[in-house]
Amino acid sequence: MKIYRNLAEIKRKESLGRRITLGGLAVLFIGLLASFTPTWFPPDQPAANALIGFVQSYWAYISFGSLALGFLASNIGSYYINRFAPRRWPDSNRIARPDELVEQNLKGFDDKYGLFLWSLPDAPYLLAGPNGIQVFIVRGDKGQVNVSGDRWKEPFSIGRMFTAFTREGLGNPGREVEETKQKVRELLQAGEASQKLGIQAGNVPIEGAVVFVNPAINLTLDNPTVPVVAVAQLKKVIRTGGKNQQMSNNDVRALTDYLQDVSVVSDL
């Protein structure tokens, strides 16, 4: 299996997440300091300078505004860190990013397959091969997730409440799969129109799956509209899901060449 990874983009977003998180903590600290203003600078005492006078007048707004802004920044930073930063996973001694876990669990496929990791527009995880294209929506959170049809739910728990600002968030991965498939179809159609794709876009099967990479996930599935799997079962899903959609070697090569041409690949 050939890997096409935009490591520079992954590192950039990891760094962005850490900077936003640190910025959020700094804003929270400023809000904390502002909350002590009535003690340090009682309102009945004259201000030593204009800055202190401003803080004396508006310390409550500064404190509550910093609280809201700091939590927002920390939440955004955690979103990027969870998706792009390496971490130690439950029941494992390995420190890895989510994209590395997906790659590790797809090892064994031959060079007819190409795995695109954050290198294609609007398709962060994409596998091209004899079965056509598989897009993956990847989640790294742990705990209980219930899927019934196209409805996704995380049952309430005390643990989730305390980790609300450090979690990636579930959202609706099934809808994301369908949106990503449509964007990939449009990408292929653009290639066909420009004659950069050497096959008809409509002849390329496009499937998708939701992949949970955290071993501590507990899935309860009731006829989900898209395949939902733990990352350890991802290879099995790919092998069994496309038996009736085999593409010729020439078509696979044309597809992979086109995707490689429109991808951004970087080792750093």
Image (cartoon, helix red, strand yellow):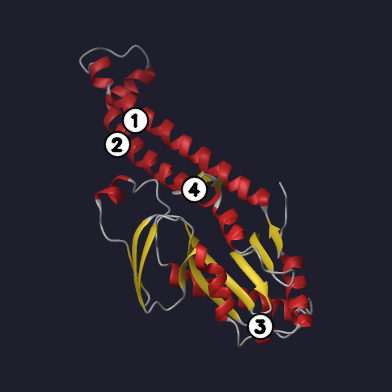
Q: Judge whether residue 41 can be spotted in this image.
A: no
Tag 4 near tag 3, CB within 8 Å: no
Quarter of the image with the N terminus in it: bottom right
Disc 1 and disc 3: Cα gap in Å?
Answer: 54 Å
From what the image shows, is residue 122 above or below residue 129?
above
Crowding at mark 4 (Cα within 10 Å: few <14, some 14-19, many 20+): few
**Within the image, what quadrant is residue 214 found in?**
bottom left
Q: Which label's residue is closer to the chain start, 4 or 1? A: 1
Q: Which label's residue is closer to the chain start, 2 or 3? A: 2
Residue placed under numbered mark 2 in the picture: 64
The total number of labels drawn is 4
Q: Secondary structure at mark 4?
A: loop
Residue placed under numbered mark 3 in the picture: 204
Give residue 97's position: percent from left, percent from top: 56, 50
Q: Secondary structure at mark 2?
A: helix
Disc 4 and disc 3: Cα gap in Å?
Answer: 37 Å
Q: Secondary structure at mark 3?
A: loop
Disc 4 and disc 1: Cα gap in Å?
Answer: 38 Å
Say which residue appears at 39% left-offset and 77% top-offset: 224
Q: Secondary structure at mark 1?
A: helix
